Image (cartoon, rainbow, N blue to C red):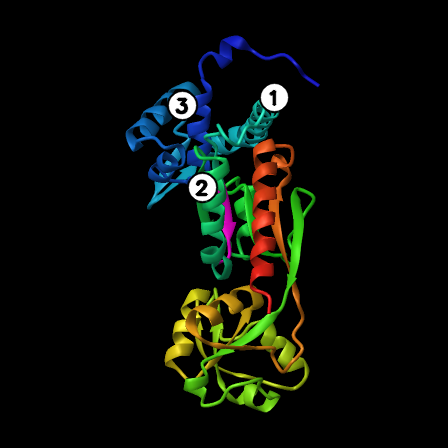
Amino acid sequence: MKDTFSEIELRKLDLNLLLVFSAVMRERSVSRAADRLYLGASAISMALGRLRDTFEDPLFVRVGSVMEPTARAIAFWQELAPALQNIDQAVRVSKPFDPSTTERIFRFGAPDDLEGLLVPRLIGRLQAEAPQARLVVRHSDFRSLLRVLDDDEADIMLSATPESGIENRHRVDPIYRERFKVLYDAGQLGFSGPLTRERYLATPHALLSLDGALESGLDQKLAESGHKRDVRVAVTHFPTIPHILKSSAMLANVPGTAAAWFARQHALEIHEPPIDFPSFEVALLSHVRVTNDPAVDWFRDLIMEEVRSLALATKD
């Protein structure tokens, strides 16, 4: 392995310039790169100017609202990205982690059925154990969560374990198995108690749909047994569903942990579905690049404790 390098060439750059290049490459936007690095847009522009002078190449060309990399930038990024990861790993491993003094920014993704329940718990733990740390929470969308981890946009993502796409570079830490529950408002539907299959299928449904489709994997399961439900509404956020149920004669299938919370907060009926839908695994996902990062290890353990506690607290 080559273990020498040119000090003369490297003196033309500094690590801050490389971090700016990395941020613009990831974000394809000067303003978003500035937000990522907590700098002003003018500082990013000045750094890009220095990089362009050094490489004698535009590096990024504006196409509409996107900063597209040139061929020279893409070639450089292929070499730079793993080098930055190695530097980051070396610094983190060599520096002992103390949660009581860390100023680390933890980046975490959560699905919106659990975000409102889990994040206040995490904030409480951080304030008590890592008072100088900061937390950035983003939506955990199963369609993009692996890309988010690959692009180093989050340390850890909480999600149902994806059925495909997981590779050796992804770490999966299972937490618990989840099952769907049926929620409805007894006053709106004019009855209470468990539903028969016939009533379940005949009653209008509200559905969570991230892509706008009026069906989900549950509908595929129903179709296998020759049944079809009556989906009338599709929304993109789980917390919207209890408000729909309180004002409409509908029911909804909601993951059990969130369903128990919604039922308590909104006085909704919660029951087992009259059809045996499969359970699914809830897990923490991360990239192997942070596997030996003591800060991420600590944060992962903290999240797992709070998720398990939350799941237990909402059991029947």
Describe the element under mark 2 as helix, strand or loop: strand
At 65% from the left edge and 64% from the top edge, which residue is drawn?
280
| Residue 80 seen in the figure | yes
Residue type marked 3: Leu
* Mark 3 or mark 1, earlier in chain: 3
Q: Is residue 19 magenta?
A: no
Residue type for callout 1 = Ser
Q: Looking at the image, is mark 2 or mark 3 earlier in the sequence?
A: 3
Instruction: Answer whether labels 1 and 2 touch (C-beta < 8 Å).
Output: no
Which residue has dot 3 on it?
51
Q: Position of residue 200 (x, y in %)?
A: 56, 86
Q: Which residues are magenta?
A: 107-111
In percent of width and height, residue 186 lies at 46, 84
- As measured in the structure, the alpha-carbon distance from the residue carrying label 2 to the one carrying label 3 is 31 Å
> Alpha-carbon distance for marks 3 and 1?
29 Å
Q: Secondary structure at mark 3?
A: helix
Which quadrant of the figure contains the N terminus? top right
Check whether the beta carbons of the residues at disc 2 and disc 3 lie within 8 A of each other: no
Q: Name the foreground residue: 122 vs 78.
A: 122
**Main SS class of the magenta portion in the image:** strand
233 and 93: which is toward the camera: 93
Which label was assigned to residue 288? none
What residue did someone put label 2 on? 135
Q: Which residue is mark 1?
A: 94
Q: Within the image, what quadrant is residue 235 found in?
A: bottom left
- Amino acid under disc 2: Leu
Q: Is residue 163 visible?
A: no
Q: Is residue 63 above or below residue 224?
A: above
Q: Do labels 3 and 1 touch, CB within 8 Å?
A: no
